[in-house]
């Protein structure tokens, strides 16, 4: 029996709408699967690296991280000419004293008291700028204080970058997420690029739209870094890692992201207040403008919430790309099931980031 014309049109409309609702999540799943196989991973056994390496560590009020950080740095192997330079960016706690106590008589380590922050600069880029001018190594590595490296982390990541003939690389540590807010939000860091950036193309491209980076563990050839203006090129950038990757790409240098889940870990935030303030300072910048943020919200709803309207199949499709990301980066599999809630919380944080513009403090400074 044929449906009345009006009901037939309504059915066709529903079918077309359902197809549209699952189209974007399906595309993200396709990209994620492709990236699962093309994502660069350090070799389990890496050869010695014969060049010189300077690890720059900008720190401000990091007394809780210093002992464990230094311990993991001491264990680094496979690099004969290796130095670690801490730049203390005006700490008001016991960071400086703890660094001196932890490095003891290890000649590879040194600490520099940062200069007074110059107008037009943000703290981290300014600290890194000072560190770069104080070293002469072939390879420059930036490590955040909350990162813990396995013993072969530096040599394996650097050798992978060199083997691909790249100017820079960013190793994503495995994100340690313990509290409920961390488990909802932190895995989205990897999911965001695993599901949207075709890495096989990005590695060969100089298009800044393909920039992927993580300042927690960032590696660059000094010659390329100096050619693009060093850290002065991102002096006022809140999201300095992505900004620096874009600078490299605009000037013709190639780079890639590395799965660092087997060689490094990082716990960025230890509580909901820390996470809330951390994302409030940066999320609005990630999308460039009000219009960019609105587009991002529409996109997030389209891929992370709207598919729920077509039932179990829609739910399966929307969590599939997140599942692939979790498998690739060793994130908790169970948390994938809460992906729509993660997206909703991310949208809230983005809105809060705009509401808190000019009022968010980080490490005691307005950003």
Image (cartoon, rainbow, N blue to C red):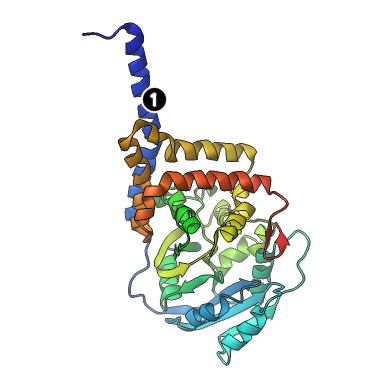
Q: Is the N terminus in the top left, top right, bottom left or bottom right quadrant?
A: top left
Q: How crowded is mark 1: few (under 14 residues within 10 Å), some or many (20 or more)?
A: few
Q: Which residue is drawn at 40% across and 36% down?
A: 24
Q: Residue at x 48, y 45 (%)?
A: 343
Would residue 201 be found to the left or right of residue 280 on screen?
Answer: left
Q: Which residue is drawn at 37% across and 46% down?
A: 321
Identify the element where label 1 is drawn. Answer: helix
- Asked if residue 135 can be seen in this view, the reply is no
- Asked if residue 314 can be seen in this view, the reply is yes
Front-lying residue, 331 or 214: 331
Front-lying residue, 289 or 83: 289
Residue 355, image quadrant: top right
Front-lying residue, 264 or 221: 264
Could you say where residue 94 lies in the image, as x and y percent from the top left?
Answer: 66, 80
Could you say where residue 16 lies in the image, as x and y percent from the top left?
Answer: 36, 23
Could you say where residue 255 lies in the image, as x and y percent from the top left?
Answer: 48, 58
Q: Is the C terminus in the top left, top right, bottom left or bottom right quadrant?
A: bottom right
Q: Circle 1 is placed at which residue position?
A: 17
Could you say where residue 55 lies in the image, as x and y percent from the top left?
Answer: 55, 75
Q: In this view, does 216 lie above or below 83?
A: above
For this orientation, the residue located farthest to the left is: 1
């Amino acid at each position: 029996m044929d449906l009345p014309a009006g009901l037939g049109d309504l059915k066709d409309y529903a079918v077309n709408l359902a197809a549209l609702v699952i189209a974007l999540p399906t595309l993200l799943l396709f990209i994620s699967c492709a990236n699962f196989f093309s994502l660069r991973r350090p070799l389990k056994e890496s050869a010695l690296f014969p060049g010189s390496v300077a690890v720059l560590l900008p720190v401000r009020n990091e007394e809780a991280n210093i002992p464990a950080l230094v311990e993991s740095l001491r264990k680094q192997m496979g690099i004969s000419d290796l130095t670690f330079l801490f730049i203390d960016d005006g700490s008001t706690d016991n960071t400086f004293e703890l660094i001196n106590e932890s490095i003891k008589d290890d000649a590879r380590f040194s600490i520099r008291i940062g200069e007074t922050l110059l107008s037009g600069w943000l703290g981290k880029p300014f600290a890194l700028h000072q560190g770069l001018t104080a070293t002469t190594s072939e390879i420059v590595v930036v490590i955040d204080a909350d990162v813990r490296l396995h013993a072969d982390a530096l040599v394996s990541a650097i050798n992978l970058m060199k083997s691909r003939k790249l100017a820079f690389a960013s190793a994503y540590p495995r994100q340690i997420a313990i509290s409920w807010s961390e488990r909802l939000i932190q895995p989205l860091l990897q999911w965001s690029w695993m599901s949207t950036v075709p890495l096989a193309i990005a590695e060969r491209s100089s298009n800044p739209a393909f920039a992927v980076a993580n300042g927690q563990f960032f590696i660059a050839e000094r010659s390329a870094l100096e050619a693009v203006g060093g850290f002065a090129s991102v002096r006022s950038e809140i999201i300095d890692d992505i900004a620096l990757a874009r600078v490299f790409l605009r000037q013709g240098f190639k780079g890639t992201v590395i799965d660092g889940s087997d060689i490094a870990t990082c716990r960025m935030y230890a509580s909901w207040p820390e996470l809330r303030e951390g994302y409030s300072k940066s999320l609005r910048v990630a999308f460039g403008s009000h219009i960019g943020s609105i587009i991002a919200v529409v996109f997030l709803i389209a891929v992370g919430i709207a598919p729920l309207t077509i039932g179990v199949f829609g739910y399966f499709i929307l969590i599939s790309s997140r599942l692939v990301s979790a498998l690739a980066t060793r994130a908790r599999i169970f948390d994938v099931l809460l992906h729509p809630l993660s997206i909703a919380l991310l949208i809230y944080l983005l809105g809060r980031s705009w509401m808190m513009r000019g009022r968010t403090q980080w490490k005691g400074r307005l950003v």
